[in-house]
Image: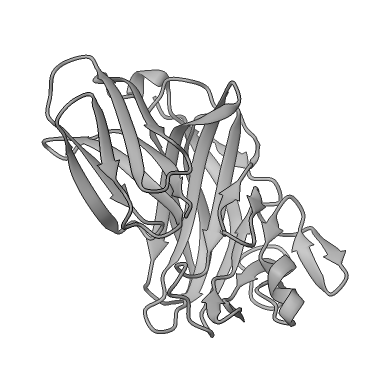
Amino acid sequence: MIIKAQAPVPNGGFESWTGFGLYEMPDAWKTTDSLSMSVGTPSATKETTDMHGGLYALKLTPFFFVFTNIPGAASNGVINTTTFQIIGGSPDTVRHAKLSGWYKYAPVSGDSCTISVTMYKRNGATRDVIGSGIFGTSAATSAYTPFDVNMNYSSINTPDSVLISIFSSAMGSAHLGTTLLIDDLAFSGFVGIHEIPGVVNSLNTFPNPAQNELNVSVDLQKNIRTRFEISDLNGRKVSSFEMKSLNEKFDVSFLVSGNYFYRLADENGNTLGSGKFSISK
């Protein structure tokens, strides 16, 4: 059952901002301005003349820092300005069906933006990913355009927190001059537990973050052929492995440090479970 009801994202319209000396930050969000302004370059600013609704929108642009270009980013979690991994999030106990919003994008040299959502459930000292979704595009749009991040759930658990991450460009391939405008974010819908595929009892990956190997453990209700797929934050598939047993160890040494999405699929390509993990080297 999906109930089409709107649920607010804290400061999802980016109407409320707080000053931090040389820069402002949208309330309830963290941005790369805390790093980019150390070299005098804004990367996440309050847009005052071009918005979808209200008085302001969020503008993200890449910046140059220590011999490389860094994408402009914003999150309701905490951005590690050394590894650019994003952790934390805000409390949320709703199994949202999707995150919607409006964006304008002017990419340079094939840049692609991403908006991702991850739902978590605390499990002792760690957190389990119980649902995730991503929207990404490299297409330019000169007018505000709607987008949806559709959620896929791999667990029947109720979440306790949500992490939203927005990047103007891909890490490692950002180009100066790319501009992403984001406005009017809102959740909608509710995914009930009976909509979870009735094939997978559990799906776990560890360690997180991983370095060279990723362990995948799955408990199935029936014996079927499955594949484990890994995608980057732009939604591009970077690897695919056949699950020859319920417990596999996959070589991920070829992946660069950063965040990735995984998906367990049956032989027909149907999603049985999904989640998010990190590589740290």
Tally of marks: 0
**Which residue is nearer to you in this view: 83 or 266?**
83
| Left or right: 37 as drawn, with respect to 259 | right
Residue drawn 54% across and 59% down?
166
**Which residue is nearer to you in this view: 181 or 124?**
124
Residue drawn 45% across and 71% down?
172
* Vertical placement of residue 82 versus 4, above or below: below
Can you give x and y, in whole percent of width and height, for residue 240 in the image? Answer: 21, 47
**Which residue is nearer to you in this view: 59 or 238?**
238
Q: In which quarter of the view is residue 173 placed?
A: bottom left
* Vertical placement of residue 108 versus 81, above or below: below
Can you give x and y, in whole percent of width and height, for residue 57 in the image? Answer: 66, 67
| Left or right: 211 as drawn, with respect to 159 | left
Q: How is the image coloured?
A: one colour
**Which residue is nearer to you in this view: 176 or 245?**
245
In the rendered view of the protein, which quadrant contains the N terminus?
top left
* Vertical placement of residue 204 versus 73, above or below: above
| Left or right: 226 as drawn, with respect to 192 | left
Q: In which quarter of the view is residue 266 placed?
A: top left
**Residue 132 visible in image:** yes
**Residue 94 visible in image:** no
Can you give x and y, in whole percent of width and height, for residue 75 in the image? Answer: 62, 54
Can you give x and y, in whole percent of width and height, for residue 237 in the image? Answer: 26, 55
* Vertical placement of residue 264 versus 66, above or below: above
